[in-house]
Image (tube, helix red, strand yellow):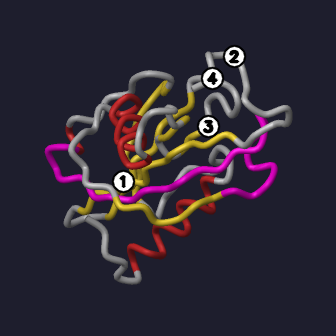
Amino acid sequence: MAEKGTYTYDWPRPMVSVDAVVFSRTAAATEVLLINRGNEPFKGCWAVPGGFLELDEELEVGAARELAEETGVTGVKLEQIRVFGTCGRDPRGRMITVVFMGTADAEQQVATKAGDDAAGAQWFDIENLPEHLAFDHDEMLKFAIEKLLNGGAIP
């Protein structure tokens, strides 16, 4: 493996991230967990919990790690649902993200607490999401919500 700060190739390579769309169902509503970004880009905007994949971790492990670091939520069974990779989706460069989806129970929902680079973590009714989500997370949520409402099996 190359040392930190060195590259094997002479040309730029895409970055890889992992995101976790986590739902919670109550008698009153279906909610989704979002974080308020504490750093640029999109500082102050709401986003799906996620971040950069470590070089030595599996995709699902990375998604669970990012979910725990940013929201305090652990133990959610995650299932890979889609890859988002449209050019220009991240102002830092070519970013490809692997998206996972899961459902939190009431105990996990109560444990929610912002951490790491998240300035806040909050559950939102899927019928009343914040405007101006970071990156392409509006498209990501639309896809996941549609999958959920159309009977898409999630853990």
Q: Which of marks 4 and 3 is nearer the N terminus?
A: 4
Q: Which residues are the magenta region?
A: 85-108
From the viewer's perspective, is residue 147 above or below residue 84? below
Toward the bottom, the furthest residue is 150
- For residue 5, which numbered disc appears in the image? 2
Q: Is residue 79 left or right of residue 94?
A: left
- Gap in angstroms between the C-alphas marked 4 and 3: 34 Å
Q: What residue type is labelled 2?
A: Gly
Indicate the position of residue 86 as horizontal and vertical percent values: 75, 58
Residue at point 48% right, 59% down? Answer: 128
Helix, strand or loop status at disc 4: loop
Give amino acid for label 3: Cys
Q: Quadrant of the C terminus?
A: bottom left
User: How far apart are labels 1 and 3 at the CA level?
Assistant: 18 Å
Which residue position holds label 1? 22
Q: Distance between the residues labelled 1 and 4?
A: 34 Å
Which image quarter: residue 152? bottom left
| Residue position marked by numbered label 4 in the rendering | 2
- Residue at position x 43%, y 54% from top? 21
Looking at the image, tell me whether mark 2 or mark 3 is earlier in sequence order: 2
- Callout in the foreground (2, 3): 2
